[in-house]
Image (cartoon, rainbow, N blue to C red):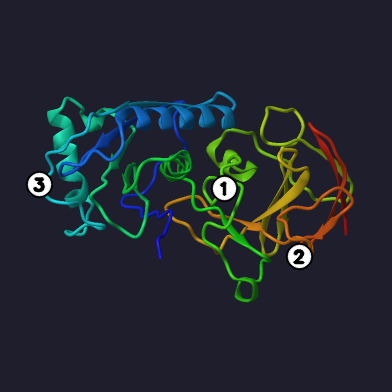
């Protein structure tokens, strides 16, 4: 089975990213040139535009791409042979330095190694990324998210994981899962892209704006329970509905931030959101009803 995304952390990821992240992409092989430098540059331009939009202009990613360095004498392994990743990254790093690209000048270094035939497409080791296939937008956003400190965005039909199971990348909306809609409100809060969101402690009606644009209205409603914390957000595109994510303090993701689990079936319908008029009962807490759903904001009612 081919694993689309893998995240292995050696050493730990850093804190929230800087406003201007510098990234070096090293293209290295034993002779092959399976895709062009221009293709990689175009894909990275798309990733930069996505991140600028998602962060509301608070972050930019600047990239330098090496020419193809085809002088590797040994095909890369899929894991460090000496207990570290130096055996993987040492040779292409040396080749890049010989071509005038010094890796220490960058916040993150991406090594595109098409000769590595592994059971994953990408793996993150601290602020070094290994890609085994041509970079795509989804792959870049996912692996860069790990270097920012984000964990996988998971999915489950319910919070009883023994009964419902857990998909490690089951969030179909976040790049940290299997989607490409946008980073979640929870992830944007972790990264400092949106301010602290209100915690719901009393039953009443609340206004909620999508976390896809700047707003003075709340962009998530946070509910603390004895079993963990819930993040509720409203999306108006490509659907109008509430999504529910659960952050379990016992679901450790070190060295990354704790993973959020998207509830894949909040109702009996085959979708991961509730629409206007529907209700989801947060276990051991409130019943949440979407009462109004417009393009720029929603109204949400909380009841015991």
Of 292 and 193, nearer the camera is: 292
- In the picture of the structure, the residue carrying the numbered disc 2 is 283
Q: Please provide percent x and percent y for residue 45.
A: 44, 27
The residue positioned 49% from the left and 46% from the top of the image is: 150
Q: Secondary structure at mark 3?
A: loop
Of 52 and 65, nearer the camera is: 65
Q: Please provide percent x and percent y for residue 172.
A: 60, 51
Q: Please provide percent x and percent y for residue 195.
A: 64, 34
> In the rendered structure, which disc, 1 or 3, sits on the residue that comes first in sequence?
3
Left or right position of 108 against 84: right
Q: Secondary structure at mark 2?
A: loop
Say few, some or many: other residues with alpha carbon within 10 Å of mark 3 (under 14 / 14 to 19 / 20 or more): few
Quarter of the C terminus within the rendering: bottom right
Say few, some or many: other residues with alpha carbon within 10 Å of mark 1 (under 14 / 14 to 19 / 20 or more): some
Q: Please provide percent x and percent y for residue 105.
A: 26, 27
- In the picture of the structure, the residue carrying the numbered disc 3 is 73
From where the camera sits, is residue 227 visible? yes
Quarter of the N terminus within the rendering: bottom left
- In the picture of the structure, the residue carrying the numbered disc 1 is 179
The residue positioned 30% from the left and 58% from the top of the image is: 118
Q: Nearer the viewer, mark 2 or mark 3?
A: 3
Q: Nearer the viewer, mark 1 or mark 2?
A: 1
> In the rendered structure, which disc, 2 or 3, sits on the residue that comes first in sequence?
3
């Amino acid at each position: 089975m081919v694993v689309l995304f893998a995240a292995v952390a050696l050493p730990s990821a850093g804190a929230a990213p800087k406003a201007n992240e510098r990234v070096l992409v090293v293209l290295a092989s034993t002779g092959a040139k399976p895709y062009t430098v221009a293709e990689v540059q175009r894909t990275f331009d798309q990733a930069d535009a996505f991140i600028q939009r998602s962060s509301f202009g608070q972050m930019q990613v600047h990239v330098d791409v090496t020419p193809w360095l085809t002088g590797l004498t040994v095909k890369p392994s899929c894991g460090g042979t000496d207990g570290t990743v130096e055996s993987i990254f040492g040779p292409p790093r040396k080749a890049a330095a010989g071509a005038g690209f010094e890796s220490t000048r960058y916040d993150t270094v991406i090594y595109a190694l098409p000769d590595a035939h592994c059971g994953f497409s990408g793996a993150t080791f601290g602020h070094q990324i290994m890609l085994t296939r041509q970079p795509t937008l989804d792959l870049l956003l996912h692996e860069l998210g790990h270097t920012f400190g984000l964990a996988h965005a998971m999915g489950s039909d319910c919070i009883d994981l023994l009964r419902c199971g857990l998909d490690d990348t089951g969030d179909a909306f976040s790049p940290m899962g299997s989607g490409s809609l946008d980073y979640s409100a929870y992830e944007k809060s972790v990264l400092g892209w949106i301010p602290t969101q209100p915690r719901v402690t009393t039953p009443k009606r609340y206004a909620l704006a999508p976390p896809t644009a700047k707003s003075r209205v709340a962009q998530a409603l946070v509910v603390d329970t004895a079993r963990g914390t819930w993040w509720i957000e409203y999306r108006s595109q490509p659907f109008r509905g509430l999504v529910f994510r659960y952050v379990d303090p016992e679901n450790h993701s070190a060295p990354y931030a704790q993973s959020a689990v998207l509830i894949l079936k909040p109702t009996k319908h085959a979708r991961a959101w509730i629409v206007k008029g529907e209700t989801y009962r947060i276990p051991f807490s409130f019943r949440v009803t979407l009462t109004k759903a417009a393009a720029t904001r929603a109204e949400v009612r909380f009841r015991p």
